[in-house]
Amino acid sequence: MGKVNGWKVTAIIFIVLFILETISFSGLILWGVALVNKEYEKETECIYNVCSGAEEYIYDEYYEICECYIDGELIKSEYMK
C-alpha cells in the first residue's frame, strides 16, 4: 500500500461528516413531525370529544388545557393528558 494523499483523508472525513449530518437532520425533522401530529390529535380530541356541544373552544398547547365556551361563558375546562 502506497502513500495516502492528504486530500483523500480529508474527502473521507467530509463524506462521513455529511452522512452524520444528514442522519441527524432527518431525525430532527421526523421528531418535529411527530410532535405536531401529537398536538393535532389533542386539539381534535378537544373539538370533538370534550367540546362537542359548545359554540367555541380554545386549546392551549402550552398548558394542554381545553376550554369550551357558550355565549362567551366558560362552561367546561379540561386538562388534556
Image (cartoon, grey):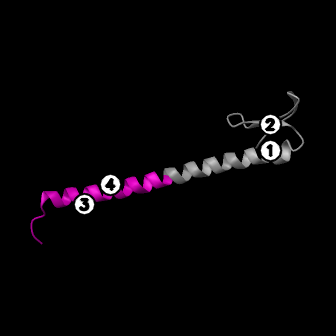
Magenta residue check for 26: yes
Q: Quadrant of the N terminus?
A: bottom left
* Residue drawn where x is 43% and y is 57% of the image: 23
Residue 29, image x, y percentages: 51, 51
Q: Secondary structure at mark 4?
A: helix
Are the residues tagged 2 and 1 within 8 Å (C-beta)? Answer: yes
Which residue is the site of mark 1?
47
Q: Quadrant of the C terminus?
A: top right
Amino acid type at mark 1 = Ile
Q: Earlier in the sequence, mark 1 or mark 4?
A: 4
Q: Residues within 10 Å of mark 1 (few under 14, many from 20)?
A: many
Query: Real-space Cα distance between discs 3 and 2?
Result: 55 Å
The segment highlighted magenta reads 1-27
Q: Earlier in the sequence, mark 4 or mark 3?
A: 3
Amino acid type at mark 2 = Tyr
Which residue is the site of mark 3?
12
Residue 10, image x, y percentages: 20, 56
In this view, the mark in front (3 or 1): 1
Which residue is the site of mark 4?
17
Q: Earlier in the sequence, mark 2 or mark 4?
A: 4
Please tell me the numbered disc located at residue 39. none
Q: Secondary structure at mark 1?
A: helix
* Residue drawn where x is 86% and y is 37% of the image: 55
- The chief SS type of the magenta part is helix
> Position of 61 compared to 12: left or right?
right
Are the residues tagged 4 and 3 within 8 Å (C-beta)? Answer: no
Q: Secondary structure at mark 3?
A: helix
Q: Residues within 10 Å of mark 4 (few under 14, many from 20)?
A: few
Query: Real-space Cα distance between discs 1 and 4?
Result: 45 Å
Q: Secondary structure at mark 2?
A: strand
Considering every residue shown, the one lying at the far top of the view is 73
